[in-house]
Image: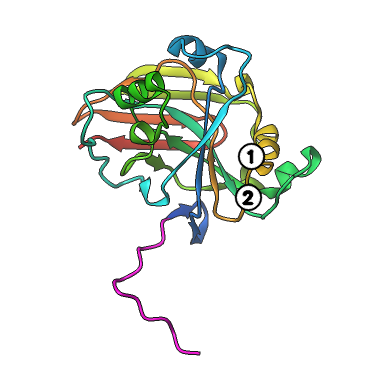
Amino acid sequence: MSAPSFLFAPPQQSSLPISGNDSRFAVRRIYCIGRNYLSHIREMGEADERDPPIFFQKPTDSIVEEGSELPYPTATQDYQYECELVVAIGKKGSLIQPDQALSHIYGYAVGFEMTRRDLQKAAAKAGQPWENGKSFDASSPCSKIYPAEKIGHPSKGHLTLNVNGVLKQSTDLSKLIWNVPEIVVQLSKLYELMPGDLIYTGTPDGVGPVVPGDVIEGAIEGVGTLRMVVS
């Protein structure tokens, strides 16, 4: 059977480097979770603290690798950072059981879930989807993937984000409302998770705006770091 002919060149496969490995992690889907730290729920003041986190997706080509420029997006006056632990799925599964959840994880990373906050708030007020505020070009900076076989499965560890050397976010992974295994279990009830999927697990309080020229630096104890410059 001959190879298919395309009208135009297919898009390039989004991928991330893997720590200690010459191969790259091909990104399939990007899942994100909102409302997964009490401090951020209280900061935003837009949900009952008893509500479960919500899931949404970002386009695969919104990935931005460290060392690339992070362009200031169009259509916003309030471009904000959110530092998050990222889970990299390495084995497919649906309806995953709690005692099997960690076996589906290949590794972890540090991610910035960038947000056009003014557009997100306008959409939420109107009862509309969040895509315009969340799912835009270059909205998913991510560090290299750190394999779990080398770093383990972090259930605690200090998470920080600095802008121009000033501390803006600080928490511990142990404060996640839904921990990583629970996230995998719940998400697998909605979608069949596949190798290459990334899950951004939520952000703490301290979110805020950045402008061109700002340097954003995130770190998660026991995982790694991510540094981006807004252009």
- Magenta region, residue range: 1-14
Colouring method of the image:
rainbow
- Name the secondary structure under disc 2: loop
Q: Is residue 69 magenta?
A: no
Q: Are marks 2 and 1 in contact (CB under 8 Å)?
A: yes
Percent of width and height locating residue 51: 61, 18
Relative to 225, 52 lies left or right = right
Give me the residue at 55% from left, 50% from top: 197
Give me the residue at 64% from left, 39% from top: 187
Q: Is residue 13 magenta?
A: yes
Amino acid found under the numbered disc labelled 1: Leu
Q: Residue 139 appears in which quarter of the rendering? A: top left
Q: Residue furthest bottom?
A: 1
Amino acid found under the numbered disc labelled 2: Leu
Res 44 seen here: yes
Q: How many marks?
A: 2
Residue 77, above or below 185: above
Give me the residue at 31% from left, 26% from top: 119
Q: How far apart, in angstroms, are the residues tagged by discs 2 and 1?
A: 8 Å
Q: Residue 168 appears in which quarter of the rendering? A: top left
Q: Nearer the viewer, residue 211 or 166?
A: 211
Res 114 seen here: no
Residue position marked by numbered label 1 in the rendering: 187
Residue position marked by numbered label 2 in the rendering: 193
